[in-house]
Image: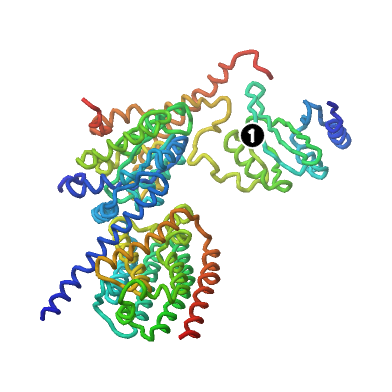
Amino acid sequence: MNAVGLNITWIIFMPILVIIIGLFYLGAARKITARIQNRYGPPIYQNIIDVIKLFSKKNPTNHGVMFSLGPVMAFSGMLISLLFIPIGNKALLSFNGDIIVLLYLLVIAPLGMALGVGEGGNPMGTIGIARALTLMLGYEVVLVISIISVILYTGSASFMEIIKMQSGGVGHWFIWPLFLSALAMDMALQGMLGEKPFDQPVAPHEVASGPMVEFGGKYLGLLQLYHAIGIVVETGIFVNLFLGGGTLFWWFVKSFAVFFVALLINAVMPRFRIGQAFAFFWTYPAAIGLIGLILVAILK
Amino acid sequence: MTKAKPPKGLKGWAQGRSLWMLHFCTGCGAIEMPPTMTSRYDMERFGITPMATPRQADLLLITGYLTVKTLKRVIRSYEQMPEPKYVVGFGSCTVNGGMYWDSYNTIKRLDLYLPIDLYIAGCMPRPEAIIDGFTELIEGIKKGKFDGWIRYKENLEYYKRNQAMVMDIRKWSLDAELAERIWNEVQEERRKRFERATVKHVYELAERIPEGLPK
Amino acid sequence: MSLEKEQKVVDLIKVSFEDAEAEIQRERRVKVKVAPNRVFPLVAYLKGNGFKHFVAISAVDWIRDGEIELVYHLWNYDEKVHVMIKTRVPRDGGSMPTLKPLFNQAETYERDIHEFFGVHFEGNEKLDREFILEDWDGPPPMRKDFDTRLFSAEFYDQEDLESEALRLKIQPYKGHLKK
């Protein structure tokens, strides 16, 4: 009975916690980028203010039912994926194969965006979402290759199982035996997070913030929340697979560390063209991932 | 019908601390923005960030002279912004025309056509002046002092009439019916002005040309 | 500095266009005055003789003569010589054949001059489209007899509208002034 009560409390508080921490991640990202660029930067809670403001805006433009459903679909797709990803050694749904389910759920969000943007009818949005889907095609291959090598190594497709196998200190983390796969996945993560050099979908100077071009007010607020959850989920996959999970505190510390690496690359890199980004994903990270996979297959 | 009011309290505070700016960079004001945004003056510490589209913006920043052709685009951008929205006129060109005050195709006073909340004077204003203006704006928004978009809505006919005097508003207005009506109403006045400004004076001016000009 | 190459261009023009007044203005500048109907063949002839770059068309309003002078600028990359072809059309109802068949970019310059000086270019199909001035009902604004100050005062001062604004109590925000 007690466990059920705990689960219900967790299911209510966990998304709120993840959203707030995700927004703090975004705020920290702005602050750190500012410090790297020798600026003072906004306060670390700036993105929370932004979201409050966006939800208090009146009469944002609406182009139709699908337009308003798009952000909702993106947001809820990310929210559902929170069920499957263990945060602090605790997953709400855990079974053999939940990694595969999560991979499918991650695709819902961009597709939802694509539907909303399609109804918006802005050519910039269409270009942006086309870029986002092209980029997804690029990094998903790398992501799947490195996840398969982890599954092959452990013989399990469950996050909790994999975390359990890594328990017992830093030396047991899979980042050491599966270094090449981890490296490939970190490169894919840069694309998933949409940080430079892979921020073609939202490039404000080229396509006027891409998919978000027609969204304003509460729709944009929802997309901000989606982005905040997305960062935690995407870095969380890496933490669970290669850095051994951890208690709630250490889980978020590791997740932020992964995000921090992406951030440093983001702050100093220019932007690829979409063709270059796609070609990059299918050459170097894919090759590194494949070598890692073959090594695992041979040495296992 | 209750009178619309600018946001106060938490909403006002959030609005003040997070101003997303659509900088409509006409004229030389555009060159004062990069120093204000980058490391020396760093506008982002107040939460002011440039945005790419009017749908996401709260603050319309007009940084210089506006020709009639540009004014159309500005008004269209302004009408697409979600409320609450603020307009800041930037430099003497928006105040009284500046050095373009006798140009045949440049408007003089921007607040005849759009509800200005704040002017930053100067030709051009230094980044210090811009930051000062923005701090005033933020403090005012937090207290709910600025109500430009409400003035625009309440006096829509007045603003539309002014706009119609200098440009064809029919293609550029969200409220097509009102635009059509006002456009038809001002035609007579517009024609008179064109006559006064051109036909009557054409030959007088031709007479005024001094002798001895090279042929 | 010898003016050999400039003299060569002048001779080149004199051979085929006896009615053209060609002269050397200074180093690398050659000035030609021709009748309006001879501009097209002259430009075509120069294009065939190395003047590949059509730089611009400019216009001058000679109000006392009742004429508008059009200046066609051509540039020869090999010889490095600039030729200005000057011709005059009447101010009222002046018309020129378009140079579009020779140089595509002439179309845009002709639209510009049509809008600002009121010269008609025969054969230019885009002439009636709005180019820079939108919704313009007045005379071409770059002519000498257009009083830009008066026009600006009529349209953009709008004192009666300001008094209307006072009546409607539309005032810019003044609360930021320190007491």
Could you say which is closer to the camera, residue B133 or residue C99? B133
Residue A55 point in image, percent of width and height: 25, 56
Residue B11 in the image, given as x and y percentages of width and height: 21, 49
- The answer to which image quadrant residue C107 occupies is top right
Which residue is farthest top? B211
The secondary structure type at the circle numbered 1 is loop
To which residue does mark 1 refer?
C93
Query: Viewer-proximal residue, C145 or B195?
Result: C145
Q: How is the image coloured?
A: rainbow
Q: Residue at x 51, y 78 (%)?
A: A290
Residue B69 seen in render: yes
Residue at 64%, 21% in the rendered image: C64
Chain label for disc 1: C
Q: Give coordinates of residue B180: x percent, y percent.
A: 36, 46
> Does B203 appear above or below B27?
above
Would you identify the image quadrant in which residue C6 lies? top right
Q: Where C161 falls versus A285 (above or below)?
A: above
Residue type, numbered disc 1:
Gly
In the image as oriented, which residue stretches furthest toward the left?
A: A1
Front residue of this view, candidates B107 and A135 = A135
Considering only vertical position in the picture, is C41 above or below A132?
above
